[in-house]
Amino acid sequence: MPRIENDIKLDFKDVLLRPKRSTLKSRSEVDLMRSFTFRNSKGSYRGIPIIAANMDTVGTFEMALALHQFTLFTAIHKHYSVDDWSEFASKHPECLESVAVSTGTGDGDFEKISAIVEAVPQLKYICVDVANGYSEHFVHFVKDVRQKFPSHTIMAGNVVTGEMVEELILAGADIIKVGIGPGDDVNQIFHCFQAP
């Protein structure tokens, strides 16, 4: 039986990130570029770690083209077909380093994601996305994706507790989607975990 927690919970709107003293003279000197080496895939990434969510209206090929020029990342929504992916890859191969192919965990999703990755082998990132990641089925799906694609970097979520973040990392995820709410993906963030 689930446990009810009555203590106060904080959301993004309740928290202020406390600034630190800086040696920079101007905000124009800020460098947002970051490098990551992922724990499970052992893959690496260099860019600005801002990811456009895989919503139907946001995670599009058009968005990926626009954001790629600024070294930003796009998780592409799951409604594109294998043919759509093949066409995009042939026209814009330079964008494949900054996009993730997304999947749900329903019937036929594993087969579809496998077909897309087979058709576009340059893809390095897979986003396993559900509204609420607190199910054994979801964790097993992430494990299955990790087993089939050992060198791909896997994003998984959505969760909000440290325990579930840990479970997804142990299941094979490299990046965790954090945030469960009323469908407002603006509040979702991705957490990256570097290899030790």
Image (cartoon, rainbow, N blue to C red):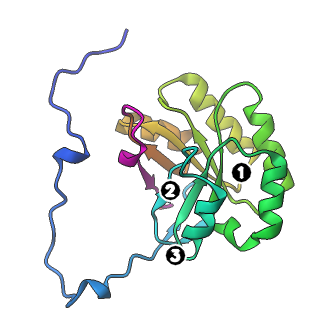
The structure residue drawn at horizontal position 62% and vertical position 37%, both measured from the top left corner, is 142
Answer whether residue 63 is visible to the viewer in this image: yes
Query: For the residue carrying disc 2, how many other residues have a C-alpha within 10 Å: few (<14), some (14-19), or many (20+)?
Result: many
Q: Type of residue at label 3?
A: Phe
Report crowding for label 3: few under 14, some 14 to 19, many 20 or more residues within 10 A (C-alpha): few
> In the image, which residues are magenta?
181-195
Q: CA distance from mark 3 to mark 2?
A: 12 Å
Residue position for label 3: 70
Residue denoted by label 2: 52
Identified by mark 2, the residue type is Ala
Taking the image as shown, residue 98 lies to the left or right of residue 134, namely right
* Residue 52 magenta: no
Dot 1 lies on which element?
loop
In this rendering, the count of numbered labels is 3
- Which of pointers 1 and 3 lies earlier in the amino acid sequence? 3
Amino acid of disc 1: Pro
Residue 2 left/right relative to 104: left
Picture coordinates of residue 135, whole percent (x, y): 52, 23
Q: Nearer the viewer, residue 54 or 154?
A: 54
Q: Could you say where residue 67 lies in the image, as x and y percent from the top left?
A: 54, 68
* Label 1 sits on residue: 150
**Residue 107's disc number:** none
Q: Which residue sits furthest bottom? A: 25
Residue 53 lies, with reference to residue 11, above or below; the image says: below
